[in-house]
Amino acid sequence: MSNFVICLGASGSGKSTSIKTLDPKETVVINVLGKRLPFKGSNSMYNAENKNLFKVSSWDSVLKLLAKINKSLPNVKNIVIDDGIYIMRNEFFDRALERGFDKYNELADHFRKIVQSCSGLRDNINVFMMLHIESVESDGGIRSYKASTVGKLLDKMYDPLENVTITLFCEPQFDENGKPTYGFYTHKLRVDGIEIPAKTPDGMFEDDFIPNDLGYVVKSMNEYYN
Protein backbone atom coordinates (compact mmCIF):
# COMPACT_ATOMS: atom_id res chain seq x y z
CA MET A 1 0.00 0.00 0.00
CA SER A 2 1.45 3.35 -1.06
CA ASN A 3 1.45 6.60 0.88
CA PHE A 4 -1.31 8.52 -0.89
CA VAL A 5 -1.56 12.24 -0.13
CA ILE A 6 -4.01 14.81 -1.46
CA CYS A 7 -2.69 18.37 -1.66
CA LEU A 8 -5.70 20.65 -1.73
CA GLY A 9 -5.62 24.34 -2.52
CA ALA A 10 -6.54 27.22 -4.80
CA SER A 11 -4.68 28.02 -8.00
CA GLY A 12 -1.44 29.84 -7.17
CA SER A 13 -1.36 28.68 -3.56
CA GLY A 14 1.94 26.80 -3.97
CA LYS A 15 0.88 23.21 -4.63
CA SER A 16 3.00 22.64 -7.75
CA THR A 17 5.93 24.63 -6.32
CA SER A 18 6.19 22.07 -3.52
CA ILE A 19 7.45 19.51 -6.09
CA LYS A 20 10.83 21.25 -6.37
CA THR A 21 12.33 19.61 -3.27
CA LEU A 22 11.70 16.05 -4.49
CA ASP A 23 14.54 14.12 -6.13
CA PRO A 24 13.79 14.16 -9.90
CA LYS A 25 15.65 10.85 -10.31
CA GLU A 26 13.05 9.22 -8.05
CA THR A 27 10.01 11.23 -9.12
CA VAL A 28 7.49 11.12 -11.98
CA VAL A 29 5.18 14.07 -12.61
CA ILE A 30 1.90 13.36 -14.41
CA ASN A 31 1.15 16.80 -15.85
CA VAL A 32 -2.55 16.66 -16.69
CA LEU A 33 -2.81 20.18 -18.14
CA GLY A 34 0.66 20.32 -19.71
CA LYS A 35 1.61 23.48 -17.81
CA ARG A 36 5.20 24.45 -17.05
CA LEU A 37 6.20 23.59 -13.50
CA PRO A 38 6.48 26.84 -11.51
CA PHE A 39 10.00 26.71 -10.11
CA LYS A 40 13.47 27.59 -11.34
CA GLY A 41 15.22 24.88 -13.36
CA SER A 42 12.12 22.75 -13.72
CA ASN A 43 12.61 22.22 -17.46
CA SER A 44 15.98 20.55 -16.92
CA MET A 45 14.79 18.58 -13.90
CA TYR A 46 11.57 17.23 -15.41
CA ASN A 47 11.28 16.46 -19.11
CA ALA A 48 10.57 13.73 -21.66
CA GLU A 49 14.26 12.89 -22.07
CA ASN A 50 14.57 12.15 -18.35
CA LYS A 51 11.38 10.08 -18.59
CA ASN A 52 9.96 11.74 -15.49
CA LEU A 53 7.39 14.14 -16.99
CA PHE A 54 4.29 12.86 -18.80
CA LYS A 55 1.45 14.85 -20.35
CA VAL A 56 -1.40 12.43 -19.71
CA SER A 57 -4.97 13.66 -19.34
CA SER A 58 -7.43 10.78 -19.85
CA TRP A 59 -8.42 8.56 -16.95
CA ASP A 60 -7.54 5.28 -18.67
CA SER A 61 -4.11 6.57 -19.75
CA VAL A 62 -3.40 7.65 -16.17
CA LEU A 63 -4.29 4.16 -14.93
CA LYS A 64 -1.98 2.55 -17.50
CA LEU A 65 0.89 4.86 -16.58
CA LEU A 66 0.45 4.19 -12.86
CA ALA A 67 0.51 0.44 -13.52
CA LYS A 68 3.66 0.77 -15.64
CA ILE A 69 5.47 2.79 -12.98
CA ASN A 70 4.45 0.34 -10.29
CA LYS A 71 5.66 -2.71 -12.22
CA SER A 72 8.54 -1.54 -14.40
CA LEU A 73 10.14 1.54 -12.80
CA PRO A 74 11.57 0.45 -9.42
CA ASN A 75 13.62 3.66 -9.17
CA VAL A 76 10.45 5.76 -8.85
CA LYS A 77 9.59 6.57 -5.24
CA ASN A 78 7.33 9.61 -5.81
CA ILE A 79 4.45 10.20 -8.22
CA VAL A 80 2.82 13.62 -8.53
CA ILE A 81 -0.51 13.98 -10.33
CA ASP A 82 -0.63 17.71 -10.97
CA ASP A 83 -4.05 19.33 -11.53
CA GLY A 84 -5.61 15.90 -10.91
CA ILE A 85 -9.23 17.06 -11.00
CA TYR A 86 -8.84 17.92 -14.68
CA ILE A 87 -8.76 14.20 -15.43
CA MET A 88 -12.44 14.28 -14.52
CA ARG A 89 -13.12 17.66 -16.12
CA ASN A 90 -11.48 16.69 -19.41
CA GLU A 91 -13.73 13.65 -19.66
CA PHE A 92 -16.75 15.78 -18.74
CA PHE A 93 -16.10 18.21 -21.60
CA ASP A 94 -15.35 15.38 -24.03
CA ARG A 95 -18.78 13.94 -23.19
CA ALA A 96 -20.65 17.23 -22.85
CA LEU A 97 -23.14 16.39 -25.61
CA GLU A 98 -24.20 13.11 -24.00
CA ARG A 99 -27.65 13.26 -22.43
CA GLY A 100 -28.72 11.67 -19.17
CA PHE A 101 -27.05 11.12 -15.83
CA ASP A 102 -25.18 7.89 -16.60
CA LYS A 103 -22.10 9.82 -17.63
CA TYR A 104 -21.86 11.37 -14.16
CA ASN A 105 -21.88 7.90 -12.60
CA GLU A 106 -19.11 6.88 -14.99
CA LEU A 107 -17.08 10.03 -14.29
CA ALA A 108 -17.21 9.31 -10.58
CA ASP A 109 -16.33 5.64 -11.13
CA HIS A 110 -13.36 6.48 -13.35
CA PHE A 111 -11.96 8.93 -10.82
CA ARG A 112 -12.57 6.40 -8.03
CA LYS A 113 -10.51 3.85 -9.96
CA ILE A 114 -7.61 6.31 -10.16
CA VAL A 115 -7.79 6.95 -6.41
CA GLN A 116 -7.90 3.21 -5.72
CA SER A 117 -4.95 2.63 -8.03
CA CYS A 118 -2.93 5.36 -6.31
CA SER A 119 -3.58 3.73 -2.94
CA GLY A 120 -2.69 0.24 -4.17
CA LEU A 121 0.80 0.87 -5.54
CA ARG A 122 4.05 -0.43 -4.02
CA ASP A 123 4.73 0.21 -0.35
CA ASN A 124 7.75 2.37 -1.22
CA ILE A 125 5.84 4.80 -3.45
CA ASN A 126 4.46 8.17 -2.34
CA VAL A 127 1.63 9.55 -4.46
CA PHE A 128 0.71 13.23 -4.33
CA MET A 129 -2.48 14.32 -6.08
CA MET A 130 -2.94 18.06 -6.47
CA LEU A 131 -6.60 19.12 -6.38
CA HIS A 132 -8.29 22.52 -6.60
CA ILE A 133 -10.83 23.72 -4.04
CA GLU A 134 -14.39 25.01 -3.97
CA SER A 135 -15.85 26.92 -1.05
CA VAL A 136 -18.59 25.41 1.10
CA GLU A 137 -20.95 28.24 1.95
CA SER A 138 -23.58 28.68 4.63
CA ASP A 139 -25.66 31.73 5.60
CA GLY A 140 -23.96 33.83 2.97
CA GLY A 141 -20.39 33.10 4.11
CA ILE A 142 -17.65 30.54 3.54
CA ARG A 143 -17.81 27.73 6.10
CA SER A 144 -15.14 25.39 4.73
CA TYR A 145 -13.60 24.03 1.52
CA LYS A 146 -13.91 20.84 -0.49
CA ALA A 147 -12.30 19.30 -3.55
CA SER A 148 -13.58 20.85 -6.75
CA THR A 149 -15.41 18.42 -9.06
CA VAL A 150 -17.89 18.86 -11.93
CA GLY A 151 -21.21 19.20 -10.15
CA LYS A 152 -23.36 18.59 -7.09
CA LEU A 153 -24.51 15.16 -8.24
CA LEU A 154 -20.93 13.95 -8.43
CA ASP A 155 -20.14 15.51 -5.04
CA LYS A 156 -22.78 13.31 -3.46
CA MET A 157 -21.45 10.17 -5.12
CA TYR A 158 -17.73 10.44 -4.47
CA ASP A 159 -15.50 12.56 -2.24
CA PRO A 160 -11.79 11.77 -2.74
CA LEU A 161 -10.88 13.31 0.63
CA GLU A 162 -12.75 10.52 2.39
CA ASN A 163 -10.44 7.96 0.78
CA VAL A 164 -7.05 9.19 1.99
CA THR A 165 -5.36 9.37 5.38
CA ILE A 166 -3.42 12.55 4.59
CA THR A 167 -4.85 15.79 3.20
CA LEU A 168 -2.55 18.80 3.14
CA PHE A 169 -4.25 22.15 2.64
CA CYS A 170 -2.11 24.60 0.71
CA GLU A 171 -2.65 28.25 1.53
CA PRO A 172 -0.19 31.08 2.21
CA GLN A 173 -0.05 32.99 5.48
CA PHE A 174 0.47 36.75 5.24
CA ASP A 175 2.48 38.96 7.59
CA GLU A 176 1.57 42.51 8.60
CA ASN A 177 3.15 43.82 5.38
CA GLY A 178 1.12 41.49 3.20
CA LYS A 179 4.12 39.26 2.40
CA PRO A 180 3.12 35.59 1.96
CA THR A 181 4.69 32.53 3.52
CA TYR A 182 3.69 29.51 1.45
CA GLY A 183 2.93 26.29 3.23
CA PHE A 184 0.63 23.39 4.06
CA TYR A 185 -1.86 23.17 6.90
CA THR A 186 -1.57 19.71 8.46
CA HIS A 187 -4.52 19.56 10.87
CA LYS A 188 -8.15 20.54 10.87
CA LEU A 189 -8.55 23.97 12.44
CA ARG A 190 -10.28 27.28 11.88
CA VAL A 191 -8.58 30.23 10.19
CA ASP A 192 -10.55 33.48 10.21
CA GLY A 193 -13.64 31.45 11.05
CA ILE A 194 -13.22 29.05 8.09
CA GLU A 195 -12.64 25.36 8.73
CA ILE A 196 -9.48 24.06 7.04
CA PRO A 197 -10.05 20.45 5.83
CA ALA A 198 -6.54 19.16 6.52
CA LYS A 199 -5.79 15.86 8.21
CA THR A 200 -2.72 13.79 9.06
CA PRO A 201 -2.13 10.79 11.35
CA ASP A 202 -1.75 11.53 15.04
CA GLY A 203 1.77 12.72 15.79
CA MET A 204 3.11 12.81 12.22
CA PHE A 205 3.38 16.62 12.28
CA GLU A 206 3.65 18.68 15.45
CA ASP A 207 3.09 21.96 13.65
CA ASP A 208 -0.26 23.03 12.19
CA PHE A 209 1.54 24.84 9.35
CA ILE A 210 4.63 23.53 7.54
CA PRO A 211 6.56 24.70 4.44
CA ASN A 212 5.13 23.65 1.08
CA ASP A 213 7.99 21.19 0.75
CA LEU A 214 7.13 17.67 -0.44
CA GLY A 215 10.67 16.50 0.31
CA TYR A 216 10.02 17.33 3.96
CA VAL A 217 6.65 15.57 3.80
CA VAL A 218 8.27 12.41 2.39
CA LYS A 219 10.93 12.47 5.14
CA SER A 220 8.23 12.89 7.80
CA MET A 221 6.13 10.02 6.42
CA ASN A 222 9.16 7.71 6.25
CA GLU A 223 10.12 8.50 9.84
CA TYR A 224 6.54 8.05 11.03
CA TYR A 225 5.74 4.75 9.34
CA ASN A 226 9.16 3.10 9.28
Image (cartoon, rainbow, N blue to C red):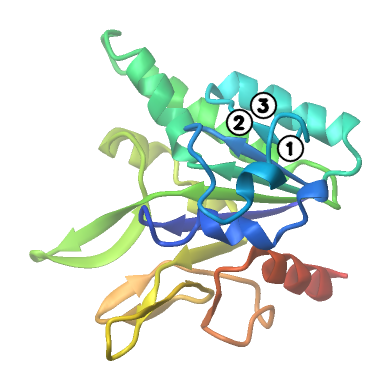
Judge whether residue 102 can be spotted in this image: no
Give me the C-alpha separation between circle 2 and circle 3: 8 Å
Q: Residue at x 45, y 65 (%)?
A: 170
Q: Is residue 152 above or below residue 138?
A: above
For marks 2 and 3, give the one nearer the viewer: 3
Q: How many marks?
A: 3
The three-letter code of the residue at mark 1 reads: Asn
Q: What percent of the width, then of the height, locates residue 2?
A: 77, 50
- Residue 201: image quadrant is bottom right
Q: Residue at x 48, y 37 (%)?
A: 35
The three-letter code of the residue at mark 3 reads: Leu
Q: What percent of the width, then of the height, locates residue 152?
A: 27, 38
Q: Is residue 12 above or below residue 221?
A: above
Q: Which image quarter is the C terminus in?
A: bottom right
Label 2: element kind:
helix
**Dot 1 or dot 3, earlier in sequence:** 1
List the residue tagged with mark 1: 52
List the residue tagged with mark 2: 113
List the residue tagged with mark 3: 63
Give me the C-alpha separation between circle 1 and circle 3: 16 Å
Q: Is residue 65 above or below residue 1?
A: above
